[in-house]
Image (cartoon, rainbow, N blue to C red):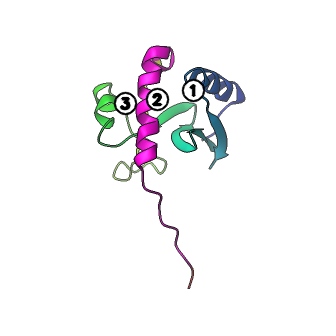
Amino acid sequence: MAVSASFRAYLLEQLGAIRPVTSRPMFGGLAIFAEGRTFALVANEVLYFKVDDTNRPDFEAAGMMPFLPFGDPAKPMQYYELPAEVLEDPEELAVWMTKAIAVAGRAKPKARKTRP
């Protein structure tokens, strides 16, 4: 799930032109944050945005697929691949990014398991 330094720099430049973002390595890939929320993941040089029922249809209409970190289609993560052309269009990117950040803001944090 490696992410090259050049692809990371490119993504941060494109996304950062829309609003401030930060990133952190995660599980061999990259997590991207805005407003303290994880709204995007990068794995194998592919950018995925956070989805729910409000924005998933946009990704599906564009023919994009969910992030399958374990390869099992029955267990997708709630992130979908961003169409490449969106990343090149600042106005369009702002729309998709704003929706993904809103989804991340609505997501409920997962409860941590406690040890007995």
Is residue 41 within the magenta segment? no
Residue kind at label 2, given as amino acid type:
Met
Magenta portion: prevailing SS class = helix
Question: Label 1: few (<14), some or many (≥20) within 10 Å?
Answer: few
> Mark 3 and mark 1: span between their CA atoms?
24 Å
Of labels 1 and 2, earlier in sequence is 1
Which residue position holds label 2? Answer: 97
Which residue position holds label 1? Answer: 19
Horizontal and vertical percent position of residue 103: 41, 42
Question: Label 2: few (<14), some or many (≥20) within 10 Å?
Answer: many
User: Which region shows up in magenta?
Assistant: 85-114
Q: Is residue 75 above or below residue 87?
A: below
> Mark 2 and mark 3: span between their CA atoms?
15 Å
Question: Label 3: few (<14), some or many (≥20) within 10 Å?
Answer: some
Q: Is residue 22 above or below residue 70?
A: above
The kind of secondary structure element at disc 3 is loop
When asked about the image quadrant of residue 114, the answer is: bottom right
